[in-house]
Amino acid sequence: MINGENLVPAPIRWGMVGGGRGSQIGYIHRSAALRDGVFTLVAGAFDLDAERGRAFGTGIGVAAERCYADYQAMFAAEAQRPDGLQAVSIATPNGTHFAICKAALEAGLHVVCEKPLCFTTAEAEELRELAEAKRRVVGVTYGYAGHQLIEQAREMIAAGELGEIRIVQMQFAHGFHNEAVEAANPATKWRVDPKMAGPSYVLGDIGTHPLYLSEVMLPQLKIRRLMCSRQSFVKSRAPLEDNAFTLMEYDSGAVGCVWSCAVNAGSMHGQKIRVIGSKASLEWWDERPNQMSFEVQGKPLQVLERGMGYLHPHALADDRIGGGHPEGLFEAWSNLYVRYARAMVASDRGDTAALAALHYPGIDAGVEGVRWVEHCVRSADAGAVWVDYA
Amino acid sequence: MINGENLVPAPIRWGMVGGGRGSQIGYIHRSAALRDGVFTLVAGAFDLDAERGRAFGTGIGVAAERCYADYQAMFAAEAQRPDGLQAVSIATPNGTHFAICKAALEAGLHVVCEKPLCFTTAEAEELRELAEAKRRVVGVTYGYAGHQLIEQAREMIAAGELGEIRIVQMQFAHGFHNEAVEAANPATKWRVDPKMAGPSYVLGDIGTHPLYLSEVMLPQLKIRRLMCSRQSFVKSRAPLEDNAFTLMEYDSGAVGCVWSCAVNAGSMHGQKIRVIGSKASLEWWDERPNQMSFEVQGKPLQVLERGMGYLHPHALADDRIGGGHPEGLFEAWSNLYVRYARAMVASDRGDTAALAALHYPGIDAGVEGVRWVEHCVRSADAGAVWVDYA
Amino acid sequence: MINGENLVPAPIRWGMVGGGRGSQIGYIHRSAALRDGVFTLVAGAFDLDAERGRAFGTGIGVAAERCYADYQAMFAAEAQRPDGLQAVSIATPNGTHFAICKAALEAGLHVVCEKPLCFTTAEAEELRELAEAKRRVVGVTYGYAGHQLIEQAREMIAAGELGEIRIVQMQFAHGFHNEAVEAANPATKWRVDPKMAGPSYVLGDIGTHPLYLSEVMLPQLKIRRLMCSRQSFVKSRAPLEDNAFTLMEYDSGAVGCVWSCAVNAGSMHGQKIRVIGSKASLEWWDERPNQMSFEVQGKPLQVLERGMGYLHPHALADDRIGGGHPEGLFEAWSNLYVRYARAMVASDRGDTAALAALHYPGIDAGVEGVRWVEHCVRSADAGAVWVDYA
Amino acid sequence: MINGENLVPAPIRWGMVGGGRGSQIGYIHRSAALRDGVFTLVAGAFDLDAERGRAFGTGIGVAAERCYADYQAMFAAEAQRPDGLQAVSIATPNGTHFAICKAALEAGLHVVCEKPLCFTTAEAEELRELAEAKRRVVGVTYGYAGHQLIEQAREMIAAGELGEIRIVQMQFAHGFHNEAVEAANPATKWRVDPKMAGPSYVLGDIGTHPLYLSEVMLPQLKIRRLMCSRQSFVKSRAPLEDNAFTLMEYDSGAVGCVWSCAVNAGSMHGQKIRVIGSKASLEWWDERPNQMSFEVQGKPLQVLERGMGYLHPHALADDRIGGGHPEGLFEAWSNLYVRYARAMVASDRGDTAALAALHYPGIDAGVEGVRWVEHCVRSADAGAVWVDYA
């Protein structure tokens, strides 16, 4: 159980790029990082508007001189301090991730970056090489992966409780963008601008979330080929899609499907993953993250509850409050930040065994997300044809 | 409200081919047809074993001399009687539907036939021409279409409550055949034998059910092209599939997806249809047929209940018992049999206006189901490529 | 599995009192009785308006001369026929049940009577003595008890799967009468008129339904004392209540609670029963009758599904269609009518062993329902005090 | 929206009594208090074992010299410091609350205290007088009240959307103590020891939670009389109950029911409140705190979702992350701690208008909870009779 004590030897000195005033994503990064004594916020380049960034930073307790005008200034100045930054989180629009992440790694910092890591597999591989060379941890915030029951699913599948895996059904299908809401909302506008958002909208923005859940639960599955059909139901979004179906064939003979959608009118999130094996299935829905269905063929459906003693110890290790009390997205993110902190500590002391024993959405997940979107787009733009996955 | 009175001027004289001892499907046909005074069971060729068929028939009240050894004998003998058959239901394995249906039409009978009507579009069209020439009604038992809330969906969509239709998500994905259960069960064995089952297993057996629901709800949608990927996870079923994904593009620019699956371990039926429009979505699940979700973007989810006064009169016309009391599959079938009876009466008196005003799964639905499976198989067998729909 | 064959040696000759044109309850009686060849409708006194009753009866296939003006005439005339009535169902307002039931028994008929059987325990006991003297079956239509999963609950509890029983939570709490709807609706008006409805409204009309479910599931429980608090939120209903809470102490030390309510605004039925034992609990809800929760302390919740092979044979014996396909209230009633028919046949041939092996809502359930309401009213009218149950 | 900025002028200097190593409740207090910059943890008497308390405190960043051996020492020493404590939270067993709370108030501190505040109404009133005399804020952690949709319910009821309130159904009915788990678990043992737990177990421990929700939603309701029946199904717990039913009559004519239970085998929390008005009902369940049912009679059920634009501004003011993303219990507690902080600030500057505009579970809620339990116990011990509420 996590109760805020003794998770790392000392809080890691941490800063943020982006995430300032009015930013929802910045708040969730801070809530998660600062919650359990694993990080301490010492610096930030919170805003493109330096003045507003400083006002914001000092308002949340950062020293004025460590509220920087931009990330370059921050990385340079902090490198000169004995108590300088050890790690940084990047919560800026997609188009800037690559450059900031690269600069942070070059500055010797551990990084936590919003997804997507960048826009092309080539860039992603470059970041991976750089991170390896610098021996720095890169976390990518596929935040839903921090939910406790995702660990439970991973362990049950590894233990063979589902039998041979046959089908993986995934979806993230909300309805919030059924109209051109971006026309009036700058915070959303960049998401449908290829320059800022990259080559896709919903594939990268939401489809990669359940995809990463499948990677956590099913590390053995390798995509062999895929096909993707995408649409822009709000016409002004073209060439970026607001709906996409992706079919995948895995090396093992299993098949998968990802439905990515932002025009699923009336739906809240609709993020679900169902893993179907020869003996049983598991199903999890991010809006009810404290429950997971386990369906053994020929037996009554079972509903597993977070926090209960029958769960795997790896799942229970994340527990903050007993079963019945609902945990939410903030706990999922906090779990990831605890893992990031542990990985950074292990990396710093060169403890490769400890590093290997940890799993979290890191640089590989970042690379894979970019690669998957790239293939989806290639397939879709060629007329929704099958493309080999490499 | 239906309460068994005055639905047709007089019960229609009706018989069955198949559906004898131990047949679940025969029982549901009889329960539906006989329930409301719309049909009366006067004859049958219930069983390949004539003796057993006669024992069964007399046991349920059919005169011994009208329990026939086979359908040919029945059609011939009944044609000689002044009180002979007017309509027949066919509840035999798939491979026999075409011949029996054709013989029944040639004998001047109205027909209710289990789906699939036959195995090829050519055969299906032949039956359609014959039915038109003979002016006989052919009903095809896409039984779920009789649920009251399907009417409600049809009316709400027609009234524009969803806006422009964008996406149709369909699935029928049960888990009962996750293992080779057919090895030990003759009643299931024919379903995976191409000679008896036709060119597909789950596409035709279950996928056509939600497909037909989409035809009822969305009569204006026309498939432009489709692609289908199918698998035989239980190897002995090849070339017949036990899982398939079908993607469809409609003329209007809308897209659709059908997931057909018999290896969805632990799932009961999993038959669902979700229609997504520019303003709102509807979702219906056959296992909770008395409820339907209506989700208007930006408003709280609404759950519509069968039998309530706020429903469309066309939906309420099917009501047998007030809201709150659950109706089930038998009521859905009974609703269809009432419509079949009304269509037969209208046809008999040449009332084309009455016929046109009725909608029910008839010969067109039968043809369309066969055509859809044919295209799915063609796509799948060519490597899951897109094929034009014609 | 029930499929309409061989349930009784020959259909029982059956008639109805009440249940004519526009009657929902009449339709459900006929649908249930006639469905499986266990009864055949030969006579009726369907309506207070003799002419309308005859029109109705002939419309559903009863010979004109056996459509009677009143029940007295029917019982007298039918007694003279060699093919006369063997059984009668009573679907008239509450205030008439006692007299008709008594007359039917005196005429030597088996009876199926709507609940409540009568208004006082003294009357109910009189009917019980008469039925015993005449060796006639009396069925009382606590129709929800026919749902298959009620049998499953009964068997699981008997097998000790819940441990020692501690608490029984019951409710039937709908919202349809949150306003004085009876002011405008004669079909509802009598329910709140003490002369026609008896000493209570919701206690007798709906509270006795889950109470009877508890009697089926927990035959060993005996009420020791109870207290009842009742309210008339729609003032014009006083002294009849539209809401009531009843607390019960059982001889065993277990306790129970029944919430009876017709002003639960927005609720459909809200009929639920939860049985809590020292090891596990069962919960069933009449609006989703194909599912039942089984909750073993310290294990994941399980959802049992009707029709599945893991159920008790006594539950599966009622099955009409496989799991996944929803059955509804009509099947529950049909199950009861099958049991009534079997009991009548067993009674007619003096087969007391067969009779003892059947359980169904019969005369004892009828007596108990009346007694319970009587005690509830006595408690409530004395200021919601505890009264001994005798 | 809350994002951690500008909630109070400066963090309030805060300490804890209890809540040390291994304490789940201590962790949730700290998570809630420290999350949004509203409090800063400067001191603590975390543990009866002073050494362990110091190790714990320094481990979470408290200066060693401000980790005290007991609360008396802490209040005395901190009073001498210019940067001494301003507020303290009490997370110790029930039997100590009164003394610590009294001492804290006498030391001029604001207090946040676990419920129950104390064991008798007389003690509770004494604390209320003391708090008023000292002009200090006392918060009582009825934590579920911090969920955003509770505000929504309060506003909808105040706006008359339910009509006249008739019935309030409440329950907190878990199954975790279906056996004598306390025999082996010291952390639970004190809950069933009257010396430490007070005059009740489940009434005070869990029943007061939904009771307080009803006070938030329905501030106008006043209990006129109540009756309570309680049981000790695990015999060793007597005289403390592990199950209780409480019926209440309100001055307005409305009625209420609270089911408090710790032996509801297999249930997780089962904390629900349903408020039934003449026009509509609201229902909320703490295990799915992001949803609330709104049922208008004669219309489809609606499901309101946390974070959506259609909610009342008072509800949305608590939002930390958009709709669809689940918030959990930690957010509910954080919301309360924000309100506590604002109340303390308002109190310190004598801003009675600001104080009056805030609502949170404070001293009045603490008094009322104690009073309610006292009346329940008096009723139960007199044989479950009605007692006037005063």
Image (spheres, coloured by chain):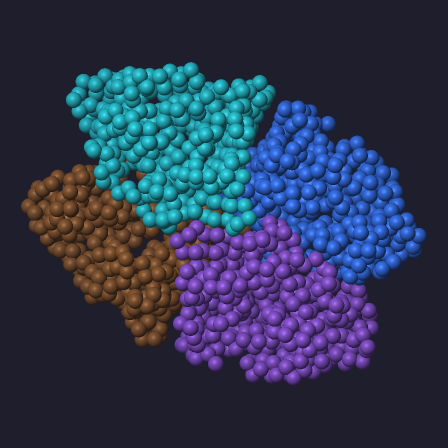
Chain colours: A purple, B brown, C cyan, D blue
* Left or right of D38 on screen, residue C301: left
Residue A341 position within the rendered picture, expressed as x and y whole percent measured from the top left: 69, 69
Q: Position of residue B121 (x, y in %)?
A: 23, 65
Q: Is residue C374 above or below residue B349?
A: above
Q: Is residue C370 left or right of residue B181?
A: right
| Residue at x 51%, y 35% (from the top left corner) | C165
Residue found at x 33% / y 51%: B145
Q: For the image shown, how many numbered marks are present on the structure?
A: 0
Residue B25, how many percent across, how many down?
A: 26, 49
For the N terminus of chain A, the quadrant is bottom right
As displayed, is residue A173 above or below residue A78? Answer: above
Q: Is residue C30 left or right of residue B267?
A: left
Name which residue lies at 34% across and 75% down.
B383
Compared across the picture, whether C203 is left or right of B2 comes to: right
Q: Hey, which residue is sitting farthest front in the picture? A: D184
Q: Is residue C48 visible?
A: yes
Q: Residue furthest left?
A: B80
- Identified at 63% across, 24% down, the residue is D383
In the figure, residue A134 lies in which quadrant?
A: bottom right
Say whether residue A234 is visible: no
Residue B153 image position (x, y, % from top left): 40, 51
For residue A386, what is the image quadrant? bottom left
